[in-house]
């Protein structure tokens, strides 16, 4: 029974998350009621409250899941690996989940998701790429690269993916390599 119960719980949570994201396509989370989320998902409000205190906690879980999977791709960006390949996988993941990323990156009600994405990206860059400059300078360099890449990705999503994943990957790494070249990293890209 435990396996079926866990499967039912996962399905319920998935339905609630999907319902929230569908509603967020047309209005901000602060204007979405629990009643709307539950009606759209076909789930009772009492069931909602078994798992979440409010729509913001539900949104936080959606964001965390997306960021956890994105971070798995970011962790693979390493100075000794084929980074274009891993960036293509990350961009493919974002494209496959474009409805969620479009809402959270392109039309956010708050900057929470963007800020968390930037922080995760910077942490992984610092861990994987050594720059030949003092710590305060490297902080600025990594922030510059991350915000620039995020802006390019946001533009790409907003344009309905006008560039192929491969072309955007090479563009991001070409620009990143140029910027990182000023500080002599081990290696920025593939």
Image: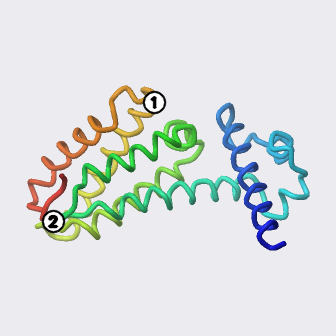
| Corner quadrant of residue 91 | top left
What residue would you read off at disc 2? 131
| Corner quadrant of residue 7 | bottom right
Q: Residues within 10 Å of mark 2 (few under 14, many from 20)?
A: many
Left-right relation of 39 to 69? right
What residue would you read off at disc 1? 158
Q: Is residue 36 above or below residue 111?
A: above
Task: Work out whether residue 150 or residue 97 is closer to the camera in this orientation and state it.
Answer: 97
Q: Is residue 156 above or below residue 17?
A: above
Residues at marks 2 and 1, CA–CA distance in whole angstroms: 32 Å
Q: Secondary structure at mark 2?
A: loop
Residue at horizontal 33 percent and vertical 46 percent from the top: 88
Which residue is the extreme one toward the bottom? 2
Q: Earlier in the sequence, mark 2 or mark 1?
A: 2
Residue at horizontal 74 percent and vertical 43 percent from the top: 19
Residue at horizontal 70 percent and vertical 55 percent from the top: 58
Where residue 166 sits: x, y (%)? 29, 38
Q: Is residue 98 above or below residue 176?
A: above
Left-right relation of 89 to 137? right
Q: Secondary structure at mark 1?
A: helix
Q: Residues within 10 Å of mark 1 (few under 14, many from 20)?
A: some
Where residue 103 sits: x, y (%)? 57, 39
Q: How many marks?
A: 2
| Labelled disc at residue 112 | none
């Amino acid at each position: 029974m435990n396996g079926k119960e866990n499967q039912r719980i996962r399905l319920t949570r998935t339905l609630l998350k999907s319902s929230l994201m569908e509603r967020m396509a047309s209005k901000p989370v602060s204007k979405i009621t629990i009643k709307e989320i539950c009606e759209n998902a076909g789930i009772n409000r009492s069931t909602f409250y078994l798992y979440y205190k409010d729509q913001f906690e539900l949104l936080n879980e959606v964001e965390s899941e997306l960021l956890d999977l994105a971070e798995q791709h970011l962790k693979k960006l390493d100075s000794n690996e084929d980074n274009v390949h891993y960036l293509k996988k990350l961009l493919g993941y974002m494209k496959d989940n474009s409805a969620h990323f479009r809402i959270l990156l392109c039309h956010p009600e708050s900057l929470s998701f963007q800020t968390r994405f930037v922080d995760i990206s910077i942490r992984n860059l610092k861990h994987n790429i050594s720059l030949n400059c003092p710590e305060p300078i490297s902080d600025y360099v990594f922030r510059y690269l991350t915000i620039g890449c995020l802006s390019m990705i946001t533009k790409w999503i907003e344009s309905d993916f006008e560039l192929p994943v491969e072309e955007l990957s090479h563009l991001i790494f070409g620009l990143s390599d140029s910027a990182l070249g000023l500080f002599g990293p081990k290696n920025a890209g593939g």
